[in-house]
Image (cartoon, rainbow, N blue to C red):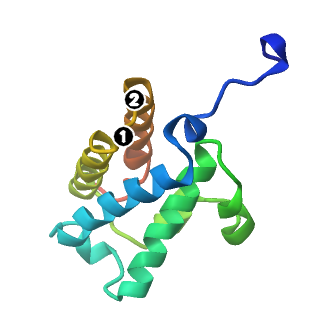
Amino acid sequence: MRHPGGVAPPTLYERVGGDAFFEALTRRFYADVRRDPVLAPLYPADEADFEAARFHLQQFLVQFWGGPATYNEERGHPRLRMRHAPFVIGRPERDAWVRHMLDAVAASGAGAMERAQLVTYFESAATHMINAAGA
């Protein structure tokens, strides 16, 4: 798509400050996940594996919001539902995940427009991950 003057508008990745924003967002989110009785059992207990999971989310979000495609280069296509299929994700897991992510977004310092975009995506993506019957 051509934009007036041939310049594309800045991506959300650029508007929020790039990698540093997503690193801080995922660190805040994962600190809350670690303490959550619903979510903690779904994440690796080993600190190195837990940090790897956090980093993968960071890379995915960087790429999704217009940053470098490092996630795809290192891990291939995201295939979010497939990657989450081994975990039982019902409404309680979805709601806990969203609550912690929205807390991280609220604390991020992002502008109102960026917060709205992030919230809309996270709520939708989390709902899409539900795979437990009756959820």
Q: Measured along the vertical axis of the image, is residue 3 above or below residue 12?
A: above
SS at mark 2 in the image? loop
Residue 90 sits in quarter: bottom left
Say if mark 1 contacts mark 2, CB within 8 Å.
no
Residue picked out by circle 1? 123
* Left-right relation of 105 to 17: left
Residue 13 x %, y %: 57, 41
Tell me if I can see residue 1 in this picture: no
The single residue placed furthest to the top in the displayed view is 4
Residue 95 x %, y %: 24, 49
For marks 1 and 2, give the one nearer the viewer.
2
Residue 69 x %, y %: 71, 55
Give residue 111's mark. 2
Residue 11 sits in quarter: top right
Q: Earlier in the sequence, mark 1 or mark 2?
A: 2
Q: Please name the amino acid that badge 1 sits on.
A: Glu
Residue 119 x %, y %: 37, 36
Tell me if I can see residue 73 in this picture: yes
Residue at 36% of width from left, 63% of height from top?
27
Q: Measured along the vertical axis of the image, is residue 82 above or below residue 109?
A: below
Give residue 104's mark. none
Crowd band around label 1 with a 10 angstrom C-alpha radius: few (<14), some (14–19), many (20+): some
* Left-right relation of 126 to 16: left
SS at mark 1 in the image? helix
Residue at 23% of width from left, 62% of height from top?
32
Looking at the picture, tell me which residue is in the foreground, 117 or 15: 15
Q: Please name the amino acid that badge 2 sits on.
A: Gly
Q: Measured along the vertical axis of the image, is residue 5 above or below residue 83?
A: above
